[in-house]
Amino acid sequence: MKKSIAEAIAQSGDRVSNSAVIQRTFAVLEAVAASGCAAAKTVATRLEIPLPTVYRLLNELADSGYLVYLKDSKRFELGPKCFELGLSFQQRLVAPQPIRQITDQLHRSLGTAAYFAIYRGSDIILTYCSDCEKHPRLRPLRFGFHEAAHATAFGKILLAGMPEPQRTDYLEARGMQVLTPQTMISREALDPHLAEVATRGIAWEHEEFLPRQTCAAVPVRNGAGMQVGAMAMSTPTSKMAGRAKLVESTLREHAGLASSYLRGGSVTVPVAEHA
């Protein structure tokens, strides 16, 4: 009978709790995913886990379909079950077509990259990006991105809508990493800023997430008036001169369309060429 991961680790003499087994298993899976393809020794060295334990975890994950063993190179890469999970995740989170159309129209109207983000449980997640070769998205930003809310415009607009205890739990769990010299990394700086964001109904981010980039976001609300998402844009700071009012009014217009859709209303998205 095939041993479970926990049993295999226990028999190896590496005594760890069930919680630690789970953490190690996911750490191994993430290490392979980060490398694209990795040998057992590489994973063991990176994670500082005994090599026999890593072999057992890798083989168990391969037997379960989460990894695939490549005999020629003696390396492991992600297996079909990981792709099934990823597809399921994307299908559950992908923005509805009208929201995608509105975000695409924002991209065309402003001539900037455009984004739609939502609350999901206790997370703030980017669910759609609209860009092109001329107006590219910020490269760290992608579908499913959920980091650095304190330093992104869509993150700040959603943080500003949270009750203070929820915001505290969120930031304490995720931290406030320094990304640029402009990043706010203390609550003493961030909280007054978020209070202003909540009052004005727009979040600006000037080179806090990436150098030489400016972003803005406004809230999207459901039928009950609750803030459930954010419509956002990003563009090089060098292209923002004299455009703040246009950016704000265009963001609000498109967020209004998205809110109307979420309230169950009929939405007609006007067509415009790239700015």
Image (tube, rainbow, N blue to C red):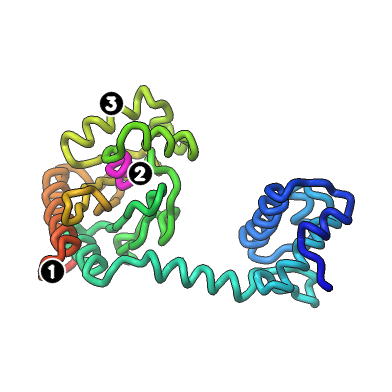
Disc 3 vs disc 2: which is toward the camera?
3
The residue sitting at 12% across, 68% down in the picture is 267
Q: Which quadrant would residue 36 be assigned to in this image? A: bottom right
Q: Name the amino acid type tagged 3.
A: Pro
The residue sitting at 43% across, 36% down in the picture is 169
Asked if the stretch drawn in magenta spans residue 155, the answer is yes
The residue sitting at 29% across, 57% down in the picture is 116
Residues at circles 3 and 2 in contact by the CB criterion of under 8 Å: no
Does residue 140 appear in this view? yes
Residues at circles 1 and 2 in contact by the CB criterion of under 8 Å: no
Q: Which secondary structure dominates the residues rendered in magenta?
A: helix
Neighbour tally class for label 3: few under 14, some 14-19, many 20 plus, Cα within 10 Å: few
Q: Residue 192 carries which label?
A: 3
Q: Name the amino acid type tagged 2.
A: Thr
Does residue 252 appear to the left or right of 127 in the view shown? left
N-terminal-most mark, 3 or 2: 2
| Element on which disc 2 rests | loop
Q: In this figure, which residue is indicated by the disc labeled 2? A: 152
Asked if the stretch drawn in magenta spans residue 87, the answer is no
Q: What range of the chain is rendered magenta?
A: 153-159
Q: Which of 13 and 55 is in front in this view?
A: 13
| x and y, in percent, of residue 102 in the image | 20, 65
